[in-house]
Image: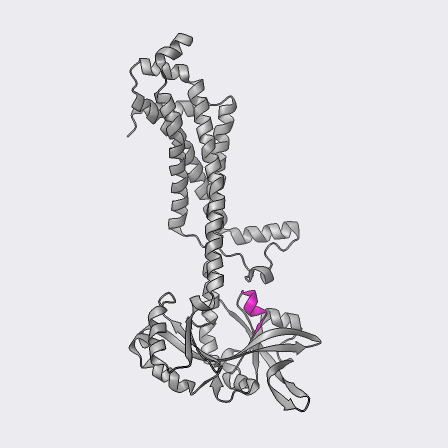
Amino acid sequence: MFSKLEKKVAFRYMRAKGKGFGSVVSWVSLLGIMLGVATLIVVMSVMGGFHETLLSRIIGMNGHVVVYHQDGAIKDYDFLIDKMRQNKIVESSITNIVPIAEGQVMVAANGNNSGAMIRGIRMSDLKSKTKTGTKIYGKDLDSIKDGELVIGSSLARQLRTTMGDNVSLISANGGTATAFGTMPRIMSYPVMSSFFMGMYEYDSGYIFMPLATAQKYLNIGDSVTHIDLFLKNPEQTTPVAESLSKLLPSGFVVRDWRDLNRGFVGALQVESNVMFLILMLIVIVAVFNIVSSLVMLVKDKSKDIAVLRTFGVSRKSMMKIFILSGTSIGIIGASLGTGLGVLLAIYIEPIRKFFQWATGRDLFPADLYYLSELPSKLVLSSVLGIALIAIALSFLATLYPAWKAANTDPVEVLRNE
């Protein structure tokens, strides 16, 4: 593709720019591309980590497909679950079907109170849902009995409770009707375990209890509020949802995790796309510096270009010389930026902790970002794509200066010397 002469002249021109403003612009171009690529890789990795971690935890604790009833309660849920399992599409797609009794309460202990969501669930189902990434403190989930609670670790700290302490649950639903109105339902239960998911929304606002305990507290009898279905492939919810819609009687509503988190998922995607476009401007600015650098190089080396053209170097070869010279800046910058970006993305959490320690400030508040750690997910295709885009832009930036060099009139240049 490039002859020995073209390579030799191109790299000599790169090394020759040791003095003058052109050299500064060249270095700024290289550093700009390097920093732009590194920043893009880090940001896109963090955004990808956010997307995967949040969705995995949200749809990990909630069903991939959820079945509700318009009346708010589902009776004979065991019969319905058996009926779902008899459907071939549903049975081949699911890993588990979990009945849930859920309601909002105020929880109080030791003079502290907070809003929370209670979720009644069979402890065997809860244990299967918390196998990956969730830490359980205190009593083992298999040993939790009727009337005992498992609360989020952040909520436990807020209420200043320890294992064995009682907390009071207060709910306006299911209260006792009196002549003065409905009295709130207040019951006290011991906290026997706590969990840490690493997702602030759950750790600070959820209380799990045995299904029978929740049914009694919510005063819904032998009913549940909804049924969660967990699939082998969370992306393949449509066939299951359509099958359930046809299978279940009227009054039932079927939703998948995309419907339930549509705004959240959409916001993550839009934010990721916008961040990519904004940060790509860093690379584009650096690439424009390559144009400036090469234009100044062509002007500075016009006499050399004229001599080479006189010696028989073709216009095509002159173009290739300057294309190689400018593209090399992009390749070097993209390569260094890729290495730096991958390194930062891998160690982003230790780096965050260091700067948090050095500044004494909480740089990643869990109550704002929902996660207790800064996630990162490197995707090889994204990393290579960013590097290739930077190199492609660098190549395009060389075309005008290379064309200008190739069209230099050697007679006119040598006449003026």
Q: Is residue 247 left or right of residue 150?
A: left
Residue at 49% x, 58% y is: 267
Tell me which corner region of the image, top left, top right, bottom left or bottom right, holds residue 306: top left
Visible residue check, residue 170: yes
Q: On screen, 316 above or below 77?
A: above
Residue at 53% x, 54% y is: 349
Residue at 47% x, 54% y is: 270
Per the image, is 224 magenta?
A: no
Q: Position of residue 192 (x, y in %)?
A: 58, 79
Tell me which corner region of the image, top left, top right, bottom left or bottom right, holds residue 153: bottom right
Instruction: Identify the residue at the far bottom of this view.
Output: 179
Tell me which corner region of the image, top left, top right, bottom left or bottom right, holds residue 241: bottom left
Instruction: Identify the residue at the far right of this view.
Output: 111
Per the image, is 204 magenta?
A: yes
Q: Where is residue 187 in the image (x, y as percent from the top left)?
A: 63, 85
Q: On screen, 383 above or below 296?
A: below
Q: On screen, 313 above or below 363?
A: above
Q: Position of residue 414 (x, y in %)?
A: 38, 10
Q: On screen, 386 above or below 350?
A: above
Visible residue check, residue 54: no
Residue range highlighted in magenta: 199-206
Classify the position of the C terminus by image quarter: top left
Coloring scheme of the render? one colour
Q: Position of residue 301 (x, y in %)?
A: 42, 18
**144 or 106, which is in the foreground?**
106
Classify the position of the N terminus by image quarter: top left
